[in-house]
Amino acid sequence: MLNWDDVLTAAPTLVTRESDGELVVVLPEQGKFVVLNATGARVLALADGTRTLREIADTLSAKFGAEPVQVAGDVLRFAQSLVERGALHVRKVM
Amino acid sequence: MNEASFDFGIAGTALRARGPAAWLTPLCSAWTAWQPAPESVPWDVCLTADASLPVPQGPLFEATPHAQGGVCTLVAPGFEGEVSAMTGAAHLRAHPEAGPADIGYFLRVVLAIQAFARGGMLFHTAGIVHRGQGYAFFGVSGSGKTTAAHFSAPAPVLNDDLVLLWPSADGWQMHATPFGRRRGAVRVAPLRALLRLIKAPDVALVPLSAGRALGELVANTPVLSADPLWLPEVLTRWEALLSAVPVYALHFRRDATFWEVIDAELG
């Protein structure tokens, strides 16, 4: 389960391609793919190994002027799904 | 062990396999109609029986190809295979208990890599010819490719699992392959549409977003989608194909009515 202090990094072997407003993310080891909308693509871009999940949520909340609690919930669910698919790696911060 | 060799090819692909006759003779007999074009330069596929390898624990088909930097390896108990797109050569060492089906699978992997290197693509799809046009029905395992082929009878089926897509001056062509079940003698047809199968109570053709289509198609490109270095080019090739060939989600049920919907939209 993700924690807010976890640092997220996109899997190094991901291959992405922007296509008509969507981001296609291919996971070569699994032969699977994920299609992200603009917000999802932004989360993936922010998961660069320097930001915690909380910082990613805060950044998006500020960018879109949205309610932080609502954004946090959405980001948590979305990040969790990408972790389960192998698109995001997690570094636990003690 | 007697040695044998045979040439095999589809569209612009060409392989020259050499190895034990016990492996190659059955394949040569089954695939004798699949001769490469005279101008196609073959890749050498060297097959070696090696009793020092462990006895195979299952068919090579169950091994997952691993690709990196243009070199694909296929390793499982009793098998050690490698295909290099850079040198155009392939080698498989296999325990003598391996069978022609294992060798056939290896040749399929080599063909997938060579086809891509030469501008085409092997594609997991049921290729069905309807009114002279080729329709590619694709989707995850169990989505209904074989069912679509069944309910399209007596239409020719290029293959119910794997076809070869090949560019030509007249557009993309869909070629039959010997790697699955076929119906009829038709070997090639112009690619009219790509149809992502979705089982549903009501038949409909539904637009598929460009991103979704691209992801689905790449995921159904065998072997090549496993290599991060090949993937950008695989995506680019599918983008080129999608600029010329329409793609839809086909909601279909277990009858032939989907052809009425296809004809109404695309016929």
Image: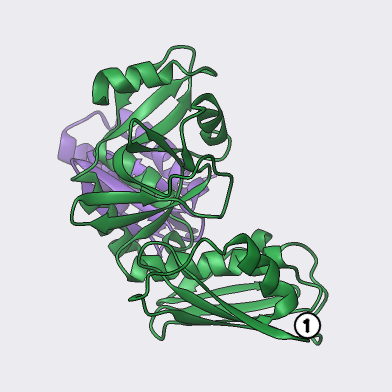
Residue beneath the point at 31% across and 50% down: B173
In percent of width and height, residue B240 lies at: 21, 53
Which residue is at 18% across, 56% downward? B169
Asked whether A64 or B82 is in front, the reply is B82
In this picture, residue B89 sits left or right of residue B92? left
Q: Is residue B55 left or right of residue B266?
A: right
Q: Residue B37, image x and y in percent?
A: 38, 70
Chain A: give its colour: purple
Give the quarter of the image for residue B122.
bottom left
Q: Secondary structure at mark 1?
A: loop
B90 in relation to B105, above or below: below
Residue A46 visible in rendering: no
Quarter of the image for residue B14 reads bottom left
Indicate whether B180 appears above or below B88. Answer: above
Farthest-out residue, top: B202
Residue occupying image coordinates x 56% and y 29%: B150
What color does chain B have in the rendering? green
- Which residue is label 1 attached to? B53
